[in-house]
Image: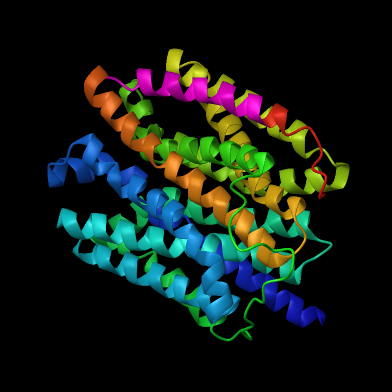
Amino acid sequence: MKSASRALLMLALLLAAINLRPGITSLAPLIERIASELALSRGLISLTTALPVLCMGLLALLAPRCAVRFGLERTITGCLVLIGLALLLRLGSQASGLLIGSAVLLGCAIAVAGPLLSAYIKRHFVGHIGRVVGWYSFGMAIGGAAGAVLTIPVTRALGDNWSFGLAGWAVPALIAAALWACLPNRKEIPGENDGQGLPWREPRAWLVTGFFAIQAGMFYTLATWLVARYHEAGFSLLYSNGLFGSFMLVGLPSAWLLPWLAQRFDIRQPLLVFCGLTMTLCLGMISVVPQWLPEVWALLMGLALSGSFALSLVLPLYEVHTSLAVSRWTAMMLCAGYCMACLAPILAGLARDLAGNYQVPFMVLAGLGVLMTLIAWCLRTPNRQS
């Protein structure tokens, strides 16, 4: 493969990755305002985060079949177009039904694109998986951070209309779709050892899925309620958004660095344990003493959570050998993982309504950090297929 061709493939991967998170993280800085203006409870407004995550789980099963029928590149192109259309729907999101409906369409597109982007990496970048996954997760971190940090300035620039601020994220999605439409398409052909279904009976697949589910549940809960927790603790809304932006931005180097370290020094499992322990500590501090060194815990939490996501994406790539098999393992990880993770922001919102504060749901998240660490420890045994 020529260098120019490889560069184009990498650019396409980065642009696709950048568009997988802004549709979700852009809601966090505005969520209390949207709930107030639309007269929605916290449990109901959390559906804007939970429903995409649920769709990302349920529809991940379709990804390998779409790759076989339509081809990897064309399917991803269609997903990016759907992301753009879903975000354009938010122009009418003063109607709560359209806001929630756009979240469903967004989740459908991300559900199929996620496993196929992992298969795309396996196909085109064999021998450079750790580094390329690092750039892939780095792109996702850029998109997530941009959605969190830039949505309010964009909203203010567009007449302080939050529906315009949310819909503006359709532009980069449609640009990415245009590039992907130019790539040559190739359908996936099942190999003899790929199997016909997902690896439900593989214990290691469940360990990978469990780790992914916990870190995803943490991310989407924090993307929904972290600003509100800081604001409840006595910080101004501006400062709370600044802490949330720091949490997202520090994920940029972490998303690239941790997968590279994992491959360079073969320390995937110790890094997973480190991420679990760090999340437990940070969530515990935010639960009990949120005003003590908040910047430190926000930065460490962003480092660990973005890193754990990037590392979880790497895991299926080392478990099996073909791109279609990787898409099956990743589809299971995303399917079961996101189906479990989607409950986290809803339950956190309901717990806030019942308890009257965010301390209780954040203490539960700290407990999940302990479980995340234990699962990471169990992943220490090398897989016989590696």
Q: Residue at x 35, y 65 (%)?
A: 168
Viewer-proximal residue among 227 and 355: 355
Name the residue rendered at 25%, 59% in the picture.
Answer: 101
Which segment is the magenta one? 357-375
- Give me the residue at 82% from left, 39% from top: 382
* Camera-nearest residue between 5 and 206: 206
Let me know if residue 160 appears in the view: no
Query: Which residue is most to the right?
Result: 265
Quadrant of residue 124 in the image?
A: bottom right
Q: Percent x, y for residue 170?
A: 38, 68
Which quadrant would residue 15 be assigned to in this image? bottom right
Asked if residue 40 lies in the magenta stretch, the reply is no
Q: Quadrant of residue 375?
A: top right
Q: Determine whether 191 is above or below 275 in the image.
A: below
Left or right: residue 125 versus residue 188 is: right
The image shows residue 13 at horizontal and vertical percentages of 62, 68
Q: Quadrant of the N terminus?
A: bottom right
Residue 360 included in the magenta stretch of the image: yes
Foreground residue among 174 and 67: 67
Judged left or right of residue 271, residue 103 is left
